[in-house]
């Protein structure tokens, strides 16, 4: 019997939510008994080669590459989950949403007190993904099926969610597992 | 008592004294009606609408509606919970509520209300408004990103502190809290210990240099949902 596949990615996030996945500790042994990790920083698989049951998305969309990855996940996963506050509402990166993009660049590459940039240019290599005008919550880019709040969501939250979904049960988080911090 | 009023909330008989609002009578009986702008020591405001209940089939704010004999109040129904969830959702997307670093997190009534309602994420799009911060006062700062326009600071300053510090200005989406001074909070007679500061249900008006003093896990709403204190009154009274 082939095991259901779980894919994960970190968009505009800090990998804290992925740390929280690892924080399920020895339960990860139980987890790999019932699922296979597919495309994920955990496996270093870069491209989807088969259909996945669950996609866990950390981080919102701050650049065009984030959008492409997110759309790729939507295409290849049955259930897409916002993992953590950044995926849900943009999080810390979204603090730039009130600052015009030009000012963000100027602060980061020209005017910031610790900037060392003798060329005086803002990086514009075609290899760099274009920054979006603001940071978008995942649900404003593709349809997200579930949301696991938290910064990061606790290991128990992630565990409960995966166990429920893998057993075809509704995802009902108890009071103690809904946290926004 | 002859002037006692009897009515029902979700089929439970509630006794009230004349002049009490539905919310006050419910509190006294140990029945929790969710609310954000209402505060026990302040006059009713009726602005947040989180306490919306159905009174004889019509939506009313429980914090302003007087208790009346024989009224049938629907409070903890799926319909009312959906209304409250929608209101709390909108409060989240209308402001900039970054719970992950907010000093009020864990002690915030807006956050606690969302927890109690089981909201994993708002269903509306975030507006990311641009709102100014006022840190001019030596003891207190205002972060309007987190303000939900409950008006508790306005009322607490007037009614409890006897000061004229805060007032609403603007209308609709432009409505915001202003201070009674030309150049910000430092020019008002607000003090850090004023009730207007502690009355803020969210992290919009905060004392400086006292943040994060309570560890995660021991904060007000870490274990018990908001309203548990009122509901505990009911169970301890053996009703």
Image (cartoon, rainbow, N blue to C red):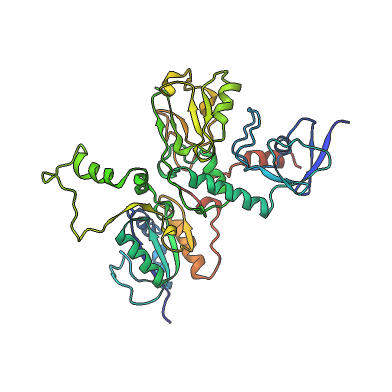
Q: Quadrant of residue A99?
A: top left
Q: Which is nearer the eye, B99 or A161?
A: B99
Left or right of A8: which side holds B16? Answer: right
Left or right of B78: which side holds A45? Answer: left
Q: Is residue B80 above or below residue A64?
A: above
- Counting from the top left corner in percent of width and height, residue B237 is at 74, 38
User: Could you tell me which quadrant the C terminus of chain B lies in?
Assistant: top right
- Counting from the top left corner in percent of width and height, residue B56 is at 78, 47
Q: Is residue B234 above or below residue A38?
A: above
Q: Which residue is rendered at x = 58% and y = 22% of the image?
A: B158
- Counting from the top left corner in percent of width and height, residue A167 is at 52, 70
Q: Which is nearer the eye, A61 or A14?
A: A61
- Most extreme residue toward the left is A118
Left or right of A39: which side holds B120? Answer: right
- Counting from the top left corner in percent of width and height, residue B113 is at 57, 44
- Most extreme residue toward the front is B171
Q: Which residue is rendered at x = 84% and y = 33% of the image?
A: B4
Q: Which is nearer the eye, A90 or B222?
A: A90
Q: Is residue B46 above or below residue A153?
A: above
Q: Quadrant of residue B150?
A: top right
- Is residue B221 in sight in this rendering? no
- Most extreme residue toward the right is B2
């Amino acid at each position: 019997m082939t095991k259901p596949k779980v894919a994960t990615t970190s968009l505009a996030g800090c990998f804290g939510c992925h740390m929280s996945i690892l924080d399920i500790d020895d339960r990860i042994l139980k987890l790999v008994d019932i699922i296979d990790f597919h495309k994920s920083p955990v496996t270093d698989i870069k491209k989807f080669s088969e259909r996945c049951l669950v996609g866990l998305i950390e981080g919102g969309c701050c650049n065009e590459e984030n959008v492409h990855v997110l759309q790729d996940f939507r295409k290849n996963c049955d259930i897409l989950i916002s993992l953590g506050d950044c995926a849900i509402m943009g999080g810390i990166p979204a603090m730039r949403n009130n600052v015009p993009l030009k000012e963000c660049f100027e602060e980061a590459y020209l005017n910031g007190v610790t900037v060392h940039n003798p060329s005086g240019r803002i990086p514009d290599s075609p290899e760099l993904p274009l920054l979006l005008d603001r940071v978008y919550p995942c649900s404003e880019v593709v349809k997200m099926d579930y949301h696991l709040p938290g910064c990061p969501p606790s290991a128990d939250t992630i565990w409960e969610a995966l166990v429920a979904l893998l057993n075809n049960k509704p995802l009902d988080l108890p009071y103690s597992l809904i946290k926004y911090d | 008592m002859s002037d006692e009023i009897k009515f029902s909330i979700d089929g439970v008989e509630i006794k009230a004294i004349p002049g009490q609002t539905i919310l006050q009578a419910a509190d006294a009986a140990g029945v929790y009606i969710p609310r954000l702008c209402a505060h026990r020591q302040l006059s009713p405001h009726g602005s947040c609408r989180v306490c919306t209940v159905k009174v004889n089939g019509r939506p009313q704010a429980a914090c302003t509606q007087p208790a009346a004999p024989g009224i049938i109040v629907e409070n903890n129904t799926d319909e009312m919970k959906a209304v409250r969830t929608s209101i709390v959702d909108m409060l989240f997307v209308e402001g900039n509520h970054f719970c992950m670093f907010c000093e009020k997190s864990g002690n915030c009534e807006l956050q606690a209300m969302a927890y109690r309602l089981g909201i994993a994420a708002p269903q509306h799009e975030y507006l990311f408004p641009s709102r100014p911060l006022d840190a001019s006062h030596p003891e207190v700062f205002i972060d309007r990103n987190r303000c939900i326009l409950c008006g508790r600071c306005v009322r607490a300053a007037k009614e409890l502190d006897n000061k004229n510090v805060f007032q609403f200005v603007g209308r609709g989406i432009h409505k915001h809290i202003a201070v009674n001074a030309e150049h910000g909070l430092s020019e008002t007679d607000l003090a850090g210990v004023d009730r207007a500061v502690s009355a803020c249900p969210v992290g919009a008006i905060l004392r400086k240099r006292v943040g994060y003093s309570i560890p995660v896990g021991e904060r007000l709403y870490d274990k018990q949902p908001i309203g548990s204190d009122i509901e505990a009154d009911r169970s301890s009274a053996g009703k």
